[in-house]
Amino acid sequence: MKCLNARGVATRPTRMQRHVVVAARANRQVGLSSKNRHNAFTSCKAARGTYNTDYSGTEDFMRHDKDVGSSEYQIARISTRIKQLTEHLKEHKTDHATRRGLMALLNKRNKLLQYLFQNDRKTYTNTIQALGIRSRLTDTL
């Protein structure tokens, strides 16, 4: 690999230039074009959001066959993911990125639970009983 400076004299490539060339070679070997990759380090072809999570127990919370948006179904799916991440963190105690993702999921589930509590109390109580979630929400008078 040769580089030319401003005067046209051959010089050694800089560290960054070597890195870019090596990354481009690696991407060509993997079969990624420059249009399809996010950066030079992309080597995993897994789709975003694939966590090998088994959502088989969440069908009970669907309102109809193609339901993906009802609050109780979202809460059930998030709860399944929370259980999986909790088990992962028991083994990998220093995985702070996963811990941060777990906290985000907990916050999202709490927001959905608050929405259900305010708008449909019966569904809220059925959902938390079925999932075994402790309720911290109370009526404020």
Image (cartoon, rainbow, N blue to C red):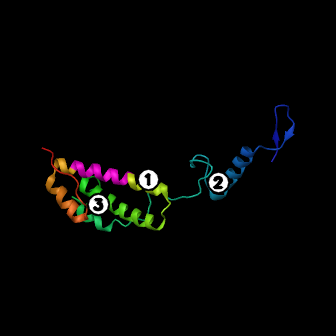
Q: CA distance from mark 1 to mark 3?
A: 20 Å
Q: Amino acid at mark 1?
A: Arg
x%, y% of residue 32?
A: 61, 53
Q: Which residue is mark 3?
A: 76
In the depicted structure, whether residue 67 falls above or below residue 90 = above
Q: Nearer the viewer, mark 2 or mark 1?
A: 1
Q: Residue furthest right?
A: 9
Give the residue at x 17% y 47%. Answer: 119
Q: At which x and y percent is residue 96?
A: 48, 56
CA gap between label 3 and label 2 equals 39 Å
Which quadrant: the C terminus?
top left
Q: Which residue is identified by label 2?
A: 27
Badge 3 marks a residue whose secondary structure is helix
Q: Earlier in the sequence, mark 1 or mark 3?
A: 3
Q: The residue under label 2 is which amino acid type?
A: Asn
Which label lies toward us, 3 or 2? 3
Query: Which amino acid type is shown beneath numbered disc 3?
Result: Ala
Q: Report which residue position mark 1 lands on.
A: 100
The residue that appears at 32% across and 68% down in the rendered structure is 56
Q: CA distance from mark 2 to mark 1?
A: 30 Å
User: Given contact means CB atoms under 8 Å apart, are the residues at marks 1 and 3 in contact?
Assistant: no
**Magenta highlight range:** 104-115
Residue 16 marker: none
Query: Is 71 placed left or right of 91 in the picture?
Result: left
